[in-house]
Amino acid sequence: MLNRYPLWKNLLIVGVFVLGIIYAMPNFYPPDYAIQIQNEQGSAAVQDRELTVALSALTESGIQIKSSSLIDGNALIRLSSADDQLKAQPLIQRALHDLNANFVIALNSAPTTPQWLRELGAEPMKYGLDLRGGVHFLMEVDTASAVEDRLEGMEQDIKRAFRSGSERVRYAGTSILEGRVLQFQFAAEDVRSKARRQVEESYPQFVVTESDLPSGADGFALNLTMSDSAIREIEDFAVQQNLQTIRNRVNELGVAEPLVQRLGRQRIVVDLPGVQDTAEAKKILGKVATLEFRLEASPDASRASTLAQNYEGRAVRLERDLILRGERVFDAQVGFDPDSGLPQVNITLDSEGGELMHRSTRHNIGRRMAVVFIETKTRDRYEFQDGREIKISEPYVEERVISLATVQAALGVSFRITGLAGDEARELALLLRAGALAADMFIAEERTVGASLGQENIELGATSVLIGFSLVVLFMLAFYQWFGLAANLALIANLLLLVAVMSSLSATLTLPGIAGIVLTVGMAVDANVLIFSRIKEELRKGTAPQLAINAGFERAFVTILDANITTLLVAIILYSIGTGPVKGFAITLMIGILTSMFTAIMGTRSLINLAVGGRPIKRLAIGWSQS
Amino acid sequence: MRMVPFMKYRQVAAWSSVALLLGAVASLSIQSLNWGLDFTGGTLVEVSYPEPTNPEQIRLNLDNAGWNGHVVQYFGSDRDILVRMPPQKTLSDKDNARLGDSLFAALSASADGQIDLRRSEFVGPAVGEELANQGGLGLLAALAMVLLYVSFRFQLKFAVGAVIALFHDVLFTLGIFSLLRWEFDLTVLAALLAVIGYSLNDTIVVADRIRENFRQSRRGKSSDIIDGSLNQTLGRTMITSLTTLLVLFALLILGGELIRGFATALIIGVVVGTYSSIYVAANVLLRLNLSREDLIVPVKEGADLDGEP
C-alpha cells in the first residue's frame, strides 16, 4: 500500500500553517518607543492644534520624531529611543500646559505591525506585568461599611416618615445590630403594629420581624433586616462606583494601557504597566474622599444646628442637616452654558438623590448651597518609644467647601453649577466625581515589577525557549533521523501556531507562560515519539514499511487523544482556579496541547506521506539501528 | 529484545514507595512546607545594589532603623537582595500595604549608592489564605476529574491506579519541598498541577497498552501481560521523559531565579511520574486483580463504568 493524504488535507495543513505565519508575524516587529497623549476627560478628543504644539516642542529640543498620528482622539508620537521617550514626556507636558486643558501624557510602546497585517486583525502578543514592568493592585471594597452607611440613611428616612406621616408613630429609640439589622424600639405594642404597617408598605427591601427587647429593658422591638438581594444591590453599586472612580484616578496617573476590572464580589484588579513610582500610584488610588451637599445656614440659626466652614477665605456657616452625600452623585461633567457660553458643571444624581435634593431645595430658592469635599489623608509623625524612633502614620480628615452657589430653582436629578472659570469647572467636576466613591477600599495585594527585571525576564525566557527547543530538535534528529526531521518541522510549526493563537486571542504572555511554552516544546514531541515507537514495533514484527507507517499512526492516535484530553482537563482546572501567573501558564499549556495534536499528528503525517508515502520502499530512516 | 521483568520487583518497589511517602508525610507534618509569600501574606522587596553587598550589614541597618521580623537574603547574585517581612499584626491593613514602600525607602537610605527596585510584593493575609484554599481545592478537583475521565474511558481499576499514582507523585514532590525547606509559592503549585498532567499522560499511555494487550491475548498471567506492555512502552516513556527533562533543565539553568522553584518541582515530578506510571499505576492494577474480564466484554467502549470495582 501507499500512504497518501488527499489533496484537501494537505491544503488544510498548508492553509493553517500560512495563517499561523501571518498571525505570529506581528511579534517579530520590534515596537516603537512612543508617547501617547489623551485628554483627561476620556470623551474629549485631542486636536490637531495640540499635536502640532507637542511636535514643535520636540523638534525645538532636537528630538527626532519617527511619525505621529491622531486616532480615536488620542495622539501617538513615535520616537527612536527610550532616551528620547523619557526626555519627551516633560517637554510635551510643559508645552501643552499652556493650552488650558488637562492632558494625560503617557509613555507607551507602539506596535509596528505593517498596515496589511493589521487589516487582517493580526496583533502582537501582550506582555504581562512581569515582563514589561509595572504595578498590580488588588483592591478590596469595604462593602460591609457601605451597607451600614445605607442602613443609617434608611434610619433617617424612616424616622422622618414616622414623624411626618398621616399617622404619627412615636418610637422610643433605634439601633443598628450586626451591621445589617435596623431596630426600632417602641413603648407600646399597638404603636409597633402601626409602625410595622407603615414600614411594610413603603420599604419592601426589609424583612420585618418583631421581638422583645433584651432582658432588663421594657418595650417592644421591630427588626428590619435587609434582604440578601438588597444587600447585594448595595454591594454592586459600591463596587461599580469605586470602579468608576478608580478609572478616573488611573487616568490622572498617565498610564498607557491600564486595566481596571472587577474581580468577584468585592474586589477590583488594577494593573498599571510601566508605572514605577508605586508610592505615588497608591497615593492617588488610595485617596478617600466623600462629598456632602448642605444648605448655608440662615443668619438667625442657632449655633448648635450649624457647622463652621471656610470658603475662599471667608467663614461660612452651614446647616448641620445634610441634604445628601457624594454617593448619590452619579456623574459630573464640564459643559458650557448655552446662553452665556461660560463653563459650568452638570451634575447628575441617582433617583433617590434627586428626590432628596428636590425636597430640600424647593422651599429654599434664593439660599445658597455648599458642596463640602471631605478627604481622609495621613500624616506621618516620629516618636521615641523604648529609645527608638518609630514612625506613626495618623489619618486625619480634611474638609473644604468646594462650591457655594445660590439655588435658583427647585433642583432635581440633574442640575448645574454655573458662574465658574474654566479651570474651576474642571477641578470641581473632577472632585465631584472623585467624591462619588461609595465605600472605603484597601489594598489586598500588590505586586511591583521593575522595568529592568521585566526586560531581564524576557531575555531569560527567550533564551530558555531557544536552548530547550534546540536540545529537543538535536535529540530527535539524532534518534529518529529523517523521521526526526519531520517531527522537528512539526515542532517548529507548533511553536508558530502557539504564538499565532495566543496573539489572535490577545492572551497575555507572562513568565510562567513562557515556562508553559518550554514545557509544551518538551511534551509536544511525545505524540511523535508514540507514533514512531509504534512504527518501529511494526517494522520489528516484519510489517512492510508503508503498512507499518499507517499502523503506527492509526494505533497511536487513540493513545495520544486520551493522554492529551486528560492533560487538557488538568490545564482547564489550573486555569479556572488560578490567578495571574498560574492562569498565564495554564493558557499556554492548553493552547500548546491543542496545537501540538494538530502538528504532531496531521503535520508529521503529511510530511512523511510526501517524503516516502508515494513510492514503494524497503527501508525507513527511523533510527532503526539504535533501538 | 530483552524484557525487563518489572513486576518481579513490584514488592520492593511498593515498599520503597510506601517508605518514601511515609517520609514525606512525616516531614510535612513535622515541619510543614516553607510557605511562600503568596500563601502567608506579608511583604517582599527585591533590590539590586550597584556593588556586591553583604546581607548581614543590611540586616543590621534595618535593625537600627527600627525594623523587626525581617529576613534578608541574596537572590540570584551577590548584588541582588531579597527582604521579606511577615504581615504586621500591629498595623492596619492599609499600613501593611504601605510597608513595601517604607522598606525600600529604608534600604535606599542605608545604601551607599543608588539602589534599584526590582520587585516588590504585598499579599494581604486574607488573600494568602484564599490562595492556599483555592490551590488545595484545585489539586482535589484535578484528581477527581481524572478519576471520572479515566473510569469513563477505561475502567474504574485504571482510574484508581492513575489517581494513586498521581497522589504518590504530588505527595513525594511536596515531601522533597518540605524536607529541603524549599519555598512553596504559586508557581510551584502550578508546577504540581503540571506534574499531574504529565504523569497522567504517562500513565494513560501505559494503561492504553495494557488494555490493548489484555484484549488481544487469550492466555498468559496478568503480571506477564502488564510486564509486556510496560516493556513495549518503555522506549517511549524514556524518550519523552528525556526530552521533557532537557527543556526543564534549560529552564532551571537559564530561566532565572523566579522560575527556579517551578522548574525544580517539575523535574522532580517528571522523574517520579515516570517511575510511578511503571510501578505505582501498574502495581495497583495487579493488586486490584485486573483480569481479562474487566476489559474484554465491554458492550461499547466505556460502558463498564458501573463494573464492580
Image: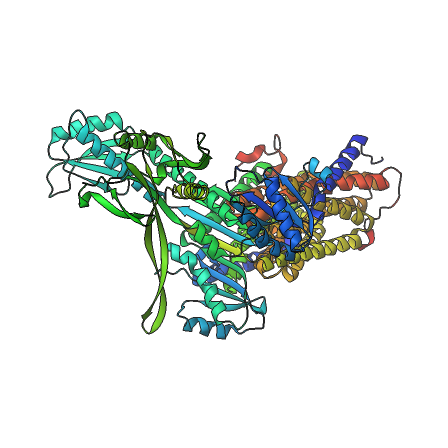
Quarter location, residue A191: top left
Residue closer to the observer: B102 or B282: B102
Residue A218 relative to residue B250: left or right:
left
* Residue A264 in view in this figure: no
Vertical arrangement, residue A261 with respect to residue B58, above or below:
above
Vertical relation: A590 (above or below) B255: above
Left or right of A601? Residue A385 is: left
Residue A587, above or below B305: below
What is the x, y in percent for residue A412? Answer: 34, 29
Q: Is B111 placed above or below B126 here?
A: below
Report if residue A138 is visible in the image.
yes
Give the image location of residue A291, x and y in percent: 34, 43
Give the residue displayed 39% in from the left and 70% down from the top: B66
For the rendered model, the colour scheme is rainbow
User: Between residues A1 and B259, which one lies in front from this camera angle?
Assistant: B259
In this view, which residue lies farthest toward the front? A340
x 49%, y 68%: residue? B108
Q: Please tell me which residue is depicted at 45% across the width and 51% down the height of the picture.
A: A284
Of A542 and A529, nearer the camera is A529
Q: Quadrant of residue A111?
A: top right
Direction from residue A438 to residue A598 in the image, left or right: right
Residue B270 position, x and y percent, is 62, 55
Image quadrant holding the N terminus of chain A, namely top right
Number of marks in the image?
0
Q: Percent from the top left, x then y, of residue B93?
A: 38, 55
Q: Is residue A614 left or right of residue B101?
A: right
